[in-house]
Image (cartoon, rainbow, N blue to C red):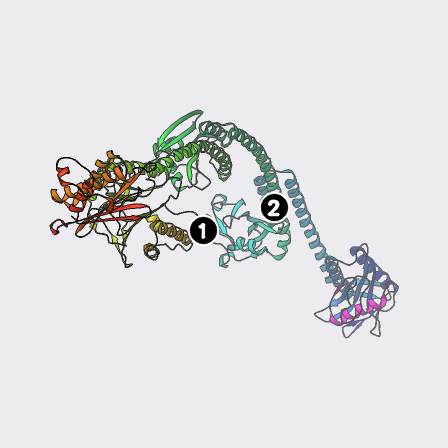
Amino acid sequence: MGEENRFFFSDNKIFTKLFQVIVSEGKKWVNANRGCLYFFNSNGVLIGNNELKNPEQAEKIAYYTLENVENLLLKKGSLIPGTSISVNESYISCYVGDKERNNLIGVFVLEGINNFDSFSKEDFELISVYSQNIYLLLHDSLYFEDLNEIYLKFATSLMILLTGTENYRENKKLDFLLKEIIRVTGIINSSHHLSKLLRELMESVKSVFRTESCSILLVDKEKNDLYFHTIAGEKEEDLSKVRVPMGQGIAGTVAITKTPMIINDAQNDNRVYKVADQTSGFVTRNILATPLVVDDEVIGVMEGINTIDRNNFNESDIDIFLTFSEAAAVAIQKARLVDDLQKANRELEKKVSELASLFDLGQAVLESKDVKELSLKSIRIIVRELDARRAVIILKDPSKQNLNLISHVQGKEEISTANFLRESVIVHAIIDNRIVLKKEVPIYQELDDLDEVFLVGSYIILPISDSNKRPFGAICISERNDKTAFNQGHLRLLQTISAQYIKGYENIRLNEDIIAKKAMEKEIEITSNIQKNILPGGVPGGSNFTFGKKFMPAKEVSGDFYDFYKYADGQFAFLIADVSGKSLPAAIFMAMSSSVIRTLSRDHKLKPSDLLAQANNLIYEDSESGMFVTLFFFHYNPANSQIDYASAGHNDQIWIKKDGTYELIKGKGAPLGVLPNGKYEGGSIIPSDGDIFVLYTDGAIEEENESHEEYGLERFVDDIIKRRDLHPQTIAEEVYETIMKFSGSNDQFDDFTLLIFKFNNDFQFSKSFKAENKQIPLLRDFVYDAIKVRKLNDILRDDILLCCDEAATNIVMHSYEGINIKNPIFTCSVKFTDNSVQILLEDNGKSFERDNVQKPSLEANIKGERKGGFGVYLIEKLMDKVEYQRKSDKNLLFLEKKIPAVYNTKS
């Protein structure tokens, strides 16, 4: 009986038996070792049987459960709440009573579990419900002592009846569900056709959950959205076109969160993706959605749409729906694994075939003697492996604007050519070095006739490039035999084949280049020798200047050249030139140009400007390649101490004066070979003692250092000026070394050519002659040529020539008489001053003693009897000044003739 909502039980055999049954059944359901029902006695103390192994722990657990009205699931080793006591068994402790009414009868405690350390959550939930049912039975039971019987209220019995009926209905439902799950599992295990399998699965889901529609959406990783894969219900065709972005709509949200969702008011929920309804015309009322998860990765979402016999989905639907979604995920994964295996087998077969083809191609690379043979073997392999009806290897002709084609069209092989300059898709792909992969030829695209042959249906254009990434052609394939489109896999295979082809192509070209290189090296060697022979040797001399030169080609052959020439009359011509371009073509053009200019310059009757004009016309006629030459021409006439010059587009040359100042020497006119009938303008200079003239090409000033700073004209001039007291050859050598140190490199940027003239106050004309009588007329010609520019009158000129003739005759006849000197010579030098002509004759004969020369007999000479002394007499009478010296074992005869002012001209 009870008091103040507290029940207690007296010791009664019938109750004891009932409680034993209750405990026994509870133990059996959860496989517990021991159990106890605690109830209050009349003193309000919990009492129970002594079956438990640890009664003290169990009582503490029971009291905690009652005091806190909280069911407990304690795992082995955990602490009893509110204490530091660790339990050595697993416990379930559930109150028997009504928590809301604070009506507690007792506590049901289970201790230990067979074969496991702890009870499960499901065990705990079952005993919790069982304990509530115990309370319901005990609370509404009536005990009649006199009858020793227990009766239940009718209402309680009715509730038990209804509960049993509901349990039966739920069991039938679960039985149906179990059968559907088993059926679906069988389908999954037996079917390899994914679409058929998923459709049956969706129909089963519709039947179990009584929905209007059910669908599976799969994730498209590339597009980051979901698409309808399988739809069981209406509007299947319309919905198949809809794609749901990841993170949007219910499906997109479930896919991101991996969490099931129920939406029971879809029309008023903003989370619902309305595009699906708008596209299909379907009205979505409610949705149940769960993720399809494989290895913790969401591969899709399963949805049930619109309940039929109820208004809403509920939470209990989720667990069952998850069972089906897990089955669907397994089915999809299984089908994908099978597909992957089949695909792997196909890929393996394909790889074996590809490897065999690559082996064949490797053999072709090794065995092919030329590009034609390699290309034909390669095109056959390409057609076979890519299943193409049309294929072509296109190679640019390196020497022409043409294309060489090795083609295979519908079984027919052909070798042909085509023009490179055309509006072709293939040609533009080569020029742009751009891969083109098309599923079909666009309708709007205008095709060149080359494209019309080789671009049919789906096609690939793959440019082929050398090691420097420069395209030299392309491989093009089109029109697959199975009418399908080429894809990225086909492109990768074609790239692999092309890599092998390029290796073979480059090996063949390398062998050809080696042969050509050897021939070229021989040609370069010959050309270099020709150049060396073209350039003048030695240095010009015999006048009032010293000369230095430095010529260093950047390569084996040079585009620079220079020339100097001393005319028979003692005048000089110098030139320096730079041909456009480099290497062998420039060298050949240089040889041609220098030959033309040298031929013209050997006659100094032409002015420098006229000479360049004639040279330009001749070079222009032969300059078909567009090459040209810049040139500076320099003519020096010692007789009037005048330099005449002209320039053909050459850089300004340099005039450094004795005081260290300088001027640039400029001329006008285009480079030779650029324009027909060119006009050239130059100028004239009268050099002074100590003046320096510098002729150079741009290689002397355009050398750069590591900072890309140019050596430059100003630095170049300064380095020469500070060395102006040195010999010109020393200046040239030191300046070259300075420039190379500035660049910091052993390799020149350009050809280096430098000519330096340093004028002095020496004799302007000088020439040596053999001490022979037959050389005397040559001496007269030399002196005549030297003085003729001054246009002296006949008497004055003849006096000078007669004195030189007499002096030379004396040297030949007397100076070397009686002494043994091999190949005796004498030298004659001529110099003009402002008002005189000075002549110096030198010989290495015996010492000339003027005092020993007898006086001439005029009478004897008149009679034609030359008895000596008359030549000396004439010289001394006709010349204004005569001096004799013996110096360094040489005889020096100095003659001077005054020139009247009227003849003192340098024009």
- Position of residue 25 in the picture relative to residue 597 (left or right): right
Residue that badge 1 annotates: 278
Q: CA distance from mark 1 to mark 2?
A: 28 Å
511 and 758: which one is in front? 758
- Position of residue 113 in the picture relative to residue 513 (left or right): right
- Position of residue 858 in the picture relative to residue 422 (left or right): left
Q: Earlier in the sequence, mark 1 or mark 2?
A: 1
Please say if 52 is above or below 301.
Answer: below
Q: Position of residue 39 (x, y in %)?
A: 82, 68
619 and 538: which one is in front? 538
16 and 444: which one is in front? 444
Residue 98, magenta (yes or no) = no
Q: Could you tell me the amino acid type at mark 1? A: Gln
> What residue lies at 73% left-to-right and 61% top-to-bottom?
129
Q: Quadrant of residue 68?
A: bottom right
Residue 627 seen in render: no
CB contact under 8 Å: marks 1 and 2: no
Residue 328 is marked as 2
Q: Position of residue 761 (x, y in %)?
A: 26, 52
Residue stretch in magenta: 54-83
- Position of residue 235 in the picture relative to residue 24 (left or right): left
Comparing labels 1 and 2, the label whose residue is closer to the camera: 2
Q: Could you tell me the amino acid type at mark 2? A: Ala
Residue 626 is marked as none
